[in-house]
Image: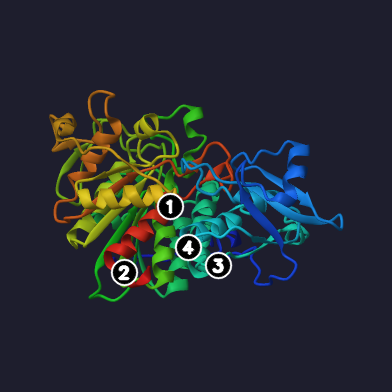
Amino acid sequence: MIPSSDATGMSDPAPSLSLSIPLPLVARRDGAVPIHVVEADTIPAHAKAWAGAVGFTGRPGSHLLVPGADGGLGSVLFGAPAPDGTQPYPFAALSAALPPGCYELATPLGPDEANAATLAWVLGRYAFGRYKEADPAAAQRTPLLVPPDGADLDHVRRTAEAITFVRDLVNTPAQDMGPAELAAAALRLAAVHDARVGVIIGEDLLDAGYPLIHAVGRAAERAPRLIDLVWGEPDAPRLTLVGKGVCFDTGGLDLKPSAGMLLMKKDMGGAAQALGLAHMIMDAGLNLRLRVLIPAVENAVAGNAMRPGDVFPSRKGLTVEIGNTDAEGRLVLADALAEADEDAPDLLIDFATLTGAARVALGPDLPALFTTDDDLAAAITATGRRLRDPAWRLPLWPGYDGWLESKVADLNNVSDGGFAGAITAALFLQRFVTETAHWAHLDLFAWTAKAAPGRPVGGEAMTIRTLFEVIADRFDEAAL
């Protein structure tokens, strides 16, 4: 583990980043209002007349309150989720809209569906409220769910906690989520799970051999750092997670336009994903030696900012020419991946809000997956589709590797043209992973741009539900 060179300057990441969240669930069943999952031709007999009178057709995701014989709420009809799997949390629409009370699902569900419905009910109540006055009466207006039979409540709880933690980290403005606060969040996570954290800060990064992390973050008032969390038994299978922690990205001297900076508080979204997945793994007690590496920086503009054309060494020994200072994420990841690769873990996964090219190709909801491991890619793809937490594989096409050539260094951090930006970024990262047989890179958005059930506009957890299951299946089948 990296030794901690300094523990100062780490402010508390605020109470809103608690790992413990209230779950709108209740064990009591007497008097619970039944929820029937229906399609147009399966509406229960007792509700057909009422549904016809008000024009309810069972459209996916819609719901209808059905009065009881006493004039109160007798039941709820909920249109069966669309089979295309594009909405991960359809049942969240109910917990967000139903009146206060106790509800239970009257339609039998399999284990996966029971977990999904319960998780969605919890996420339907998510809101980022750090900067708003708390509503003391909000809890009294929360509808409660009797979890369906077969739901694994421990798994639902840890997943909801992880997703909430990721969203809160990403939603927090950069003024309150800089490199020090991101390190504080990792320390809080470590304290919960009895993990160890080391942090290297500022100029000490040069002495420790992380010149690219230092180069990207040196112009900011808030010092760059490398965060290193370690948990688990030393002889267990080794999993390393790396997360891009650019807490704000101005673009550096290749300055972004103002519109391009509006969402740059989310440029540490990769780090948030890594921490959220780490929480799930540690909370479940998987038989793993877990390591989480987060290069935490702010890409700022100052007299000592890195310049286009500068050449820097890397931890791997490769020299890198800076073709564009706004391609900083791959630089900090390069040093972190080189550190991870020195251990040759059994599996190495990195998360990054890395390229606009991936968003152009796949849009905001489909993270791009890069790996040379066909079995791993197949497992992530199949599990992602089943859990509605997808990733889409793109190729590490070797024909584009030459596009990263530099006349003055071992490689450039960008290619000459504008083609295949997500692929060339992944190829750049691949240069720093040479000893690890199984590596996956996820280029994701970490943000919901258009509100949907259980997914308000704002920070989003992506692929961590899928990867938890893939990792548990690969290394710890007893956990499933």
Label 4: element kind: helix
Task: Work out whether mark 3 precedes mark 1 in sequence or the reverse, and give the earlier one.
Answer: 3
Question: Percent from the top left, x then y, of residue 102?
Answer: 72, 63
The answer to whether residue 153 is left or right of residue 200 is right
Task: Work out whether mark 4 precedes mark 2 in sequence or the reverse, and give the earlier one.
Answer: 4
Q: Amino acid at mark 2?
A: Glu
Determine which quarter of the picture holds residue 149. bottom right
Name above or below for residue 94 compared with residue 363: below
For marks 3 and 2, give the one nearer the viewer.
Answer: 3
- Whole-angstrom CA distance, mark 3 to mark 1, is 18 Å
Q: Measuring 29% from the left and 65% from the top, which residue is drawn there?
A: 2
Quadrant holding the N terminus: bottom left
Q: Measuring 44% from the left and 58% from the top, which residue is drawn there?
A: 276
Other-residue count near label 3 (Cα within 10 Å), few / some / many at <14 / 14–19 / ≥20: few
| Residue nearer the viewer, 42 or 248 | 42
Return the residue at label 3: 149
The answer to whether residue 242 is left or right of residue 87 is left
- Whole-angstrom CA distance, mark 3 to mark 2, is 22 Å
Determine which quarter of the picture holds residue 409. top left
Label 3: element kind: loop
Q: Which mark is residue 477?
A: 2
Name above or below for residue 137 compared with residue 393: below
Q: Amino acid at mark 1?
A: Leu
Question: Percent from the top left, x then y, of residue 28?
Answer: 69, 72
Quadrant holding the C terminus: bottom left
Return the residue at label 4: 111
Q: Are marks 4 and 1 in contact (CB under 8 Å)?
A: no
Return the residue at label 1: 387
Task: Work out whether mark 2 precedes mark 1 in sequence or the reverse, and give the earlier one.
Answer: 1
Q: Amino acid at mark 3?
A: Asp
